[in-house]
Amino acid sequence: MGARVRSVGPVPDLPTRIPGLLLRELKVEDADAYYALLDRNRAHLGRLGDYQAEVAATPAWVRAHLGEVPDAGLRYGIRLHGELIGRVDLPAVDPPRYGTGYWLDAAHTGAGRATAACAALYEHAARALGATDVFAGVTHGNDRSVALLRRLGFRQVAVFADYTRFRLRLTR
């Protein structure tokens, strides 16, 4: 199935609670910077078996990947003072229910940046998209990701052979 054109209009930049940390839509124009980020994080991204496409990425794959428009979802680059340091996505699973995925440059972990980026995106999703729930799957052993989700209020809802599913209710 090919990518469809998104109908939600322009994707706004999203500030976070951390000064200088901003979410900006990740586009094909970011391919060189995104490839460089992937290239220096191959071991970090593949240590638990996640992100295998990114671990094997070539410049051509990155350009093609970023050239696809997410189906009614959002794809953001996490930027610190303009530098691309990670990514957070909000795929439209079954709107108003969304999924999420995120990763941060290994050199930028441990400072609350991923938590702040995800919080900004989920708040935007509730407000602008009417999102009611966000789901995340975390590979067993990824304790840092589990801790991030718990800080944001996610609750475990299912355990599978390779991963655990978490859910954040955005409406009460």
Image (spheres, rainbow, N blue to C red):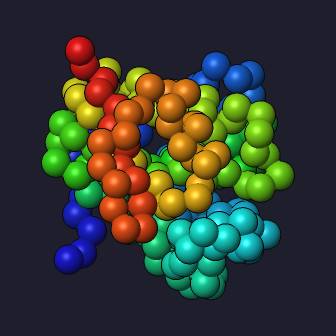
Q: In screen coordinates, is 74 left or right of 143? A: left
x and y percentages locating residue 154 in the rendered image:
41, 32
Which residue is most to the top?
172
Q: Residue at x 16, y 48 (%)?
A: 94
x and y percentages locating residue 38 in the rendered image:
68, 69
Q: Quadrant of the N terminus?
A: bottom left
Q: Quadrant of the C terminus?
A: top left
- Total number of numbered labels? 0
Which residue is most to the right?
107
x and y percentages locating residue 128 in the rendered image:
30, 26
Q: Residue at x 18, y 36 (%)?
A: 96
Which one is nearer the viewer's eye here, 106 or 150? 150
Q: Residue 62 sits in which quadrant?
A: bottom right
Which one is nearer the viewer's eye here, 166 or 75? 166
Which one is nearer the viewer's eye here, 29 or 47? 47
**Any part of residue 23 in sight:** no
Q: In screen coordinates, is 119 left or right of 82? A: left
**Any part of residue 88 in sight:** yes
When the figure is inspected, residue 114 is found, relative to residue 60, above or below; the finding is: above
x and y percentages locating residue 163 in the rendered image:
42, 60
Which one is nearer the viewer's eye here, 5 or 65? 65
Q: Residue 48 sits in which quadrant?
A: bottom right
Q: Residue at x 48, y 67 (%)?
A: 66
Q: In screen coordinates, is 104 left or right of 131? A: right
When the figure is inspected, residue 97 is found, relative to residue 142, above or below; the finding is: above
